[in-house]
Image (spheres, rainbow, N blue to C red):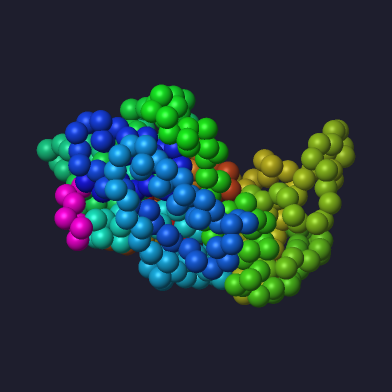
Amino acid sequence: MVAGLSGGVDSAVAALLLKRRGWNVTGLFMKNWEDDDDGEYCSSRQDLIDVMSVADTIGIDVEVVNFAREYRERVFSIFLEEYKAGRTPNPDVLCNSEIKFKAFLDHALRMGADRIATGHYAGVRESEQGFQLLRAEDGAKDQSYFLYRLDQRQLSKALFPLAGLRKREVRALAREAGLHVAGKKDSTGICFIGERPFKEFLMRYLPLEKGEIRGLDDDRPLGEHDGLAYHTLGQRKGLRIGGVKGGKGSDAGSHEAWFVARKDLARNILYVVQGHDHPALFSDALTAGQLSWISGATPHTHWVYGVKTRYRQADAPCGIEAIDAATCKIRFAAPQWAVTPGQSAVVYESQMCLGGGVIL
């Protein structure tokens, strides 16, 4: 058994539980990013120190492997291409399917392991229909959304020891075991961005392409943007065109905040509307591509499912209509706010994650 160790409390407790259950555990620390790894934003050096301390306390060996090349080719390059195309990608989804459950899994199998484990909050079970991906017990921490692209082979090799635990229980187990990471702050995101300003990071790879900001309702010029890549649907902050949320009576419309509603890539125009509840911010349906269904088959087209169009969103009742093998239409029972191209639409049936696709 090879357990991924990130330097955080979740992966540490996952390895601890496996060791207590009698598994022969080897820890594996993945280095996925090398550019500007100076400790200011990307904490891999400190994370490795924490991993070694955890492994020593638990009593397991650790191997360090560098997947920076695979990460750049399979995750970061796609991340940049999506932003260039005006979409808003989710690199965590790609990182799981391409690195943690592909590059890491393949490496573990070459080491002689039969299974891998991670500190994800999710569950997996085997049924007559195959392996199923389940939500975690802790709904506030559930990460099945980011794992929806896993296939039957990947799930058959995966263990998620934290599936039935809540975060507070995980920290308590870490404290009881004397793991110094028991109180360590959760990671804020993907390493190559960390806590740095997102726009500042993106500007290093995507050149500024200034263009107009216009009102969608009247097409009047309102300001200037630095590039469509730096904006996402539903965005409110950073537009630099004024507008104070609030307003009452006849002045309500003129004082409400501005929100990004549309991108015109051909003309490099960013369209905005006033008010969080403007009709242009809502969608009755979406089209998804790059479909990945965990069972290998498209869900029944006339059943009612739940869908998330972004992480931490409540399930929205929906129906699925297959267009072809590569795309489908997802229709909402009620209009959804700021459905964003590039993000993932992930479909659920009760506690089971069925898979999903990228919003087109």
Q: Is residue 61 left or right of residue 342?
A: left
Give residue 95's quadrant in the image. Answer: bottom left
Q: Main secondary structure of the magenta part?
A: loop
Provide residue 195's location: percent of width, then percent of height: 62, 51
Q: Is residue 296 left or right of residue 318?
A: left
Magenta highlight range: 109-115
Provide residue 204's location: percent of width, then percent of height: 63, 71
What residue is shown at x 38% (from left), y 64% (from top)?
67
Give residue 185's quadrant in the image. Answer: top right
Provide residue 70's location: percent of width, then percent of height: 38, 68
- Observer-nearest residue: 54 or 357? 54
- Relative vertical location of residue 208 with respect to residue 32 in this rendering, above or below: below
Provide residue 299's location: percent of width, then percent of height: 27, 45
What residue is shown at x 56% (from left), y 46% (from top)?
188
- Relative vertical location of residue 135 with respect to residue 75 in this rendering, above or below: above
Kindly tell me whether residue 333 is visible in this rendering: no
What residue is shown at x 67% (from left), y 61% (from top)?
199
